[in-house]
């Protein structure tokens, strides 16, 4: 019976044949270097030519699937569950082929309503080989992680084709709960968990203003009496507002005035960093000696830095008093639109 010779056997026979043909050499003669044809043929077969190398490089660059095995395997998704199972017929014989499978996850071993369902049918039918199959649950319906969040026990129900769901359901282990370790339960983040400065305007959105300073206030400690004929700083009525970006500052001055005569009048203005931002021309008194006043305005496009707001009064030579505890200066700062 003829058998196909191996390459090594052919090489050995060729060497033996070549040695038999050469015969003995004359005494003192230099050996003749002979490169047999079989050796040249073997060298051509074993060493790739430059054209072959270039073709391999082009294929690797143009067809990524050829180079994929050379790359490191990608990390397993944290939103899927790997499940391996075995399918057999009623006689226990393992099945092979493509099968439509439906997977459901419950929080009870029997009955109940599925928390999540995924269909592996049609083009996504499961490949089964000698009864064994492997699927990544959640790779078709990516709501798996949110669907099982907060449940202590989970059970997997499997339906093959048009059959009824298999019994009993499979209780899932620790993998689904490791997925929940990456989620944050509702109401679990408090003020102490948020780093200062972490919440920015970009996170709040355009329709919500981020307050830089909730409120800054200053109160007159006693009674301020003045009869000067020039502008005078009111003691204690000075506040500082620190802004992180160009903002609008709402300034409010509430005070109680006391003067000697109803006909006396005076002027009030408010400075920001020594520059007037509000001016009250005159306040005339028509009734009573005591009265409560209120000044409120918006100081817009205030640069991002720390600013000082100061109240001044000009009594025009008449004695005028601002009285505590009724006199207060306040400000609240927020972003512009």
Image (cartoon, rainbow, N blue to C red):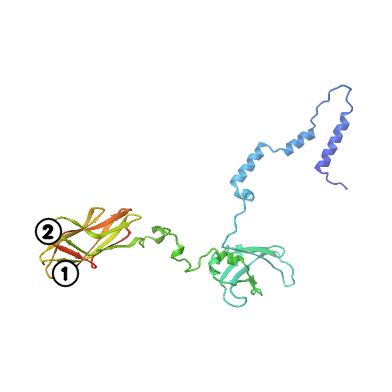
Task: Give the crowd class for mark 1: few <14, some 14-19, many >=20 residues within 10 Å.
Answer: some
Query: Along the horizontal axis of the image, is 180 left or right of 268?
Result: right
Check if mark 1's residue and mark 2's residue have beta carbons within 8 Å. no
Mark 1 vs 2, N-terminal side: 1
Res 236 seen here: yes
Image location (x, y in percent) of residue 25? 88, 25
Query: Along the horizontal axis of the image, is 82 left or right of 94?
Result: left
* Identity of the residue furthest to the top in this view: 28
Quick one: SS at disc 2?
Answer: loop
Name the foreground residue: 268 vs 25: 268
Residue drawn at the location 57% of the way across and 69% of the way down: 117
Q: Quadrant of residue 175?
A: bottom right
Question: Which residue is under mark 2?
Answer: 317
Image location (x, y in percent) of residue 72? 62, 51
Q: CA distance from mark 1 to mark 2?
A: 19 Å
Task: Give the crowd class for mark 2: few <14, some 14-19, many >=20 residues within 10 Å.
Answer: some
Query: Along the horizontal axis of the image, is 33 left or right of 326?
Result: right
- Quadrant of the image for the C terminus? bottom left
Query: Along the horizontal axis of the image, is 16 left or right of 149?
Result: right
Residue drawn at the location 17% of the way across and 56% of the way down: 231
Q: Quadrant of residue 190?
A: bottom left
Name the foreground residue: 233 vs 244: 233
Residue drawn at the location 14% of the way across and 69% of the way down: 289
* Identity of the residue furthest to the bottom in this view: 111
Image location (x, y in percent) of residue 46? 73, 39
Name the foreground residue: 126 vs 251: 251
Q: Which mark is residue 290?
A: 1
Quick one: SS at disc 1?
Answer: strand
Name the foreground residue: 286 vs 21: 286
């Amino acid at each position: 019976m003829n058998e196909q010779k191996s390459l090594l056997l052919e090489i050995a026979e060729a060497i033996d044949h070549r040695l038999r043909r050469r015969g003995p050499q004359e005494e003192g003669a230099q050996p003749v270097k002979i490169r047999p044809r079989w050796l040249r043929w073997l060298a051509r077969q074993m060493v790739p030519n430059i054209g072959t190398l270039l073709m391999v490089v082009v294929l690797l660059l143009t067809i990524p699937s050829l180079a994929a095995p050379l790359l490191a395997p990608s990390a397993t998704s944290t939103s899927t569950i790997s499940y391996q199972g075995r399918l057999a017929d009623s006689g226990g014989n393992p099945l092979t082929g493509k099968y439509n499978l439906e997977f459901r996850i419950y929080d009870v071993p029997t009955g109940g309503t599925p928390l999540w369902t995924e269909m592996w049918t049609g083009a996504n039918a499961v490949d089964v080989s000698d009864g064994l199959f492997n699927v990544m649950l959640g790779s078709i319906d990516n709501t798996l992680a949110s669907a099982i969040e907060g449940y202590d026990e989970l059970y997997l129900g499997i339906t093959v084709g048009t059959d009824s769901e298999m019994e009993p359901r499979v209780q899932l282990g620790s993998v689904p709960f490791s997925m929940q370790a990456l989620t944050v339960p509702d109401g679990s983040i408090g003020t102490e968990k948020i780093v200062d400065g972490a919440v920015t305007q970009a996170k709040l959105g355009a329709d919500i203003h981020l307050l830089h300073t909730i409120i800054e206030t200053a109160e007159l400690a006693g009674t301020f009496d003045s009869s000067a004929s020039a502008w005078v700083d009111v003691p204690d009525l000075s506040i500082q507002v620190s802004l992180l970006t160009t903002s609008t500052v709402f300034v409010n001055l509430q005070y109680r005035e006391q003067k000697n005569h109803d006909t006396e009048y005076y002027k009030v203005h408010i400075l920001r960093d020594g520059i007037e931002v509000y001016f009250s021309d005159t306040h005339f008194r028509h009734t009573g000696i005591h009265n409560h006043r209120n000044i409120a305005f918006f100081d817009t496009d205030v640069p991002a830095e720390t600013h000082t707001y100061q109240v001044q009064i000009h009594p025009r030579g008449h004695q005028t008093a601002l009285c505590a505890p009724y006199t207060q200066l306040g400000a609240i700062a927020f972003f512009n639109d």
